[in-house]
Image (cartoon, grey):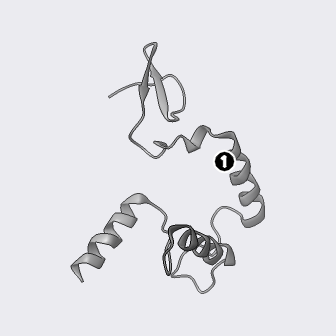
Amino acid sequence: MLTIDSLPGRTVQAEGREFLYCGGTSYLGMARNEDFATLLAEGMRRYGTNYASSRLSNVQLRVFEEAESHLAAYAGAEAALTVSSGYLAGQMVVKTWQG
């Protein structure tokens, strides 16, 4: 196991050396991106941390539909679906391919 000296971003520092960080949940460096942190804080103030985000709930925040519409338009797709993790996204793809 690699012990790191600070929070990971696109790279990590360990034992005085810099390494690309291609694991965990910050391989894009979002955890240390100041613009993203600002947007995240604004979103948390507006929407909270875990309210009506599950598709199994009886209500859903409109922001999820808006985000998926923007993502679909960006990708040139008819529709898009966002999920909470890369693992879940992969599982959905496999199940879709299996029929």
Q: Position of residue 91 (x, y in %)?
A: 32, 68
Q: Nearer the viewer, residue 75 or 50?
A: 75
Q: Position of residue 68 (x, y in %)?
A: 57, 73
Q: Disc 1 marks which residue?
A: 36
Q: Nearer the viewer, residue 2 or 89?
A: 89
Is residue 23 positioned above or below 6 on the image? below
Residue type at numbered disc 1: Phe
- Name the image quarter holding the N terminus: top left
Question: Which residue lies most toward the left here?
Answer: 98
Question: Which residue lies most toward the front here?
Answer: 76
Relative placement, left or right, of 61 versus 11 is right
Question: Which residue lies most toward the top here?
Answer: 16
Q: What residue sits 27% from the left and 71% below the top?
A: 94
Residue 33 falls in which quadrant of the image?
A: top right
Neighbour tally class for label 1: few under 14, some 14-19, many 20 plus, Cα within 10 Å: few
Q: What residue sits 39% from the left and 66% below the top?
A: 89
Q: What residue sits 49% from the left and 64% below the top?
A: 84
Is residue 27 positioned above or below 20 on the image? below
Q: Secondary structure at mark 1?
A: helix
Relative placement, left or right, of 80 versus 59 is left
Q: What residue sits 53% from the left and 40% below the top?
A: 29
Residue 62 falls in which quadrant of the image?
A: bottom right
Relative placement, left or right, of 69 versus 88 is right
Q: Position of residue 69 (x, y in %)?
A: 60, 76
Q: Nearer the viewer, residue 75 or 33?
A: 75
- Name the image quarter holding the C terminus: bottom left
